Amino acid sequence: MTLRSILALTFTVEQLHQHYQLDTEAILARHGLQQAHLDANATISQADELAILAEFADQIQHDPLAAITIGSTFGLSSYGAFAMMLMSCSSVYEAFSLGIKYQQLSYLFSELDYQLNGGTVLLRLKPYRLPDHLLRFIVDRDVAGTWHFLNMMQTMLGQQLKPLAVYMPYPQPEEALAYRDKFQCPVEFGRDEAAFVLPAEVLRLPFPGGNSTALALYRSQCDEILKRRSQVRTEALSERLQQYLSMFSQRFPAIKECAATFALSERQFRRLLSDEGQSFQLILDRVRSEKACHLLLNSSTSVEQIGLLLGYSEAAGFIHAFKKWQGMTPAKYRKSSTQ
């Protein structure tokens, strides 16, 4: 399984503790980590990092702009050799191209690319499949962090360019004006993906500090990092997948989306699960069964509503599935457990 640098998580933890006085140690401990012992060279899977970020997001819901604040403080040190490689490029075009090629070394939960459209260029961030309650937090951190990085690049160029527009892939929030103030341009919500709309001539700007020798050095370091992280780990993939799926309700991700989150091809993903004696459908059924049992035992939510929460459009489909999981109908399970 391809892994990610733990640097971005470490930096996020520090900023959350500093700005919001969160008990970050307790949250990390639940995932077997200690802040004081986080090695800057360590790695973490996307799914594991996402589970930790979900807990942080739940605790700062009182500040809907928290992720924008945190992402805007990411310094070059949080990007490591990846940042130094881009800073050594000869032009913005070369930096964009290498940034996309080596995007696995970034902290993004998005697929990065760019598209020329007449006189503009769209730097696009297409989010991975994320739980609805976590989408805004992750996108805001990714977009704010990317824009902060672009601003640092502009400083090197002696430029102060502003985007023509910024796109966000979720409905317009009450704090929409704060986003316009942040990016100093129109911000359009409800788009399919996040994006910065920039003048196309930006790509032609040269980097005054471009250095081909330094670029070759940092690029080789990035290649070596990717090589180390590409080593496949087969242990407990099924457990990590179950933890990931447990964060969703109603609209569960498809196997292809899950594979992308774990930075695997769908074929690799299926094979690794099979090696553990598991399958995607088996784990998804297990997650749905556990959620259903919990709701039946600990709430008065109707069987029909529970079915909807688990992604079934009709109660009959949910009842049929539950009988397969537990050997009885949801109503009988609730009644027998109560007795």
Image (cartoon, rainbow, N blue to C red):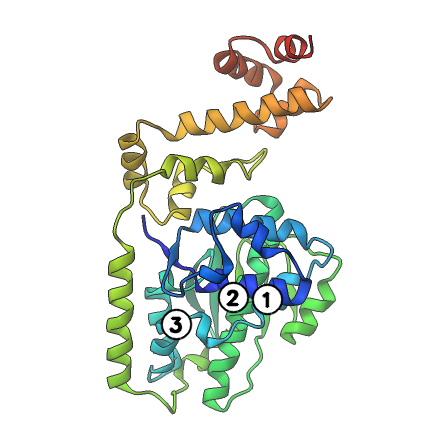
Q: Residue 70: give x, y in percent of width and height.
A: 60, 66
> Where is mark 2, residue-wise?
11
Disc 3 to disc 1, C-alpha distance: 18 Å
Q: Residue 191: give x, y in percent of width and height.
A: 58, 55
Above or below for 82 versus 265: below
The answer to whether residue 257 shows anywhere in this view is yes
Q: Residue at x 56, y 65 (%)?
A: 14
Asked if labels 2 and 1 touch by Cβ distance under 8 angstroms, the answer is yes
Q: Secondary structure at mark 1?
A: helix
Amino acid on which the number 1 mark rests in the picture: Gln
Asked if labels 1 and 3 touch by Cβ distance under 8 angstroms, the answer is no
Q: Quadrant of residue 131?
A: top right
Please identify, in this view, whether the residue under mark 3 or under mark 1 is nearer the observer. Answer: 1
Residue 80 disc label:
3
Relative placement, left or right, of 100 versus 334 is: left
Q: Residue at x 63, y 8 (%)?
A: 332
Q: Secondary structure at mark 2?
A: helix
The answer to whether residue 313 shows anywhere in this view is no
Disc 3 to disc 2, C-alpha distance: 12 Å
